[in-house]
Image (spheres, rainbow, N blue to C red):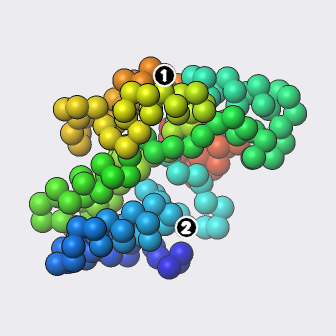
Amino acid sequence: MSSIKKGELAMVICDVIKSDWSMDMKKNILEKQLLWGRYRPRVYTNDDLPPDAIWFSRKAEKTYKQNVKNGAINKRDRYKGLIREHLVPRTVIFNELLKIKRITPKKVDDLLSELLIIVVVTKDEDRKLDQTGLRSKMPEGWCYGDDPFQRHKAAGIVKVDWIPETLAERYKRHGIEY
């Protein structure tokens, strides 16, 4: 399953959504078995895969830089005290996929490229999402096409246009702008 290519996976997602299976089965297949671990929003041509789209909160940037300053060499140590989480909750993405009229692989790729993004936050900021009731949903009134950062803004989490040099180098090598 890990060798599925981008276009093939979008076709599988379309087939699952078009199927007459129950919603629970569709959700299980997309959320747990297919979508989240295997979809990549870009097509890669070599083994040196760039990371998925990643954004940092202001506090996460400071924590990451402090970890590096304190001598963190490996990835685990650099991300100490930080959590990688979905910009838009998986259940919201699943529901948005179900809303697509006349679903096609291109529509699936477009939606996932815009919403399936990782945000790095501190553990305290992650708790704020729980406290505001936005752990697994977007703010009231949000719909696809609106600012996907609304959930984090509502929890007081500030996004910065910064990524670690190691990621910036990999993005640049692959011609990806951030």
Q: Judge whether residue 135 can be spotted in this image.
A: yes
User: Which residue is painted at 42% across and 70% down in the image?
Assistant: 34
Of labels 1 and 2, the one closer to you: 1
User: Which residue is painted at 16% across and 56% down in the image?
Assistant: 99
Identify the residue under disc 1.
158
Mark sitting on residue 71: none
Query: Would you say 82 lies left or right of 57 here?
Result: right
Query: Would you say 20 lies left or right of 35 here?
Result: left
Amino acid bearing label 1: Val
Amino acid bearing label 2: Thr
Viewer-closest of 128 and 93: 128
Q: Residues within 10 Å of mark 1 (few under 14, many from 20)?
A: some
Identify the residue under disc 2.
45
Where residue 133 appears, as percent x and y from the top left, is: 37, 32
Q: Answer with the quarter of the image where residue 6 lies.
A: bottom left
Viewer-closest of 30 and 134: 134
Vertical relation: 111 (above or below) 7: above
**Which secondary structure lies at badge 2?**
loop
User: Which residue is painted at 43% across and 28% down in the image?
Assistant: 131
Q: Judge whether residue 43 can be spotted in this image.
A: no
User: Which residue is painted at 61% across and 67% down in the image?
Assistant: 46
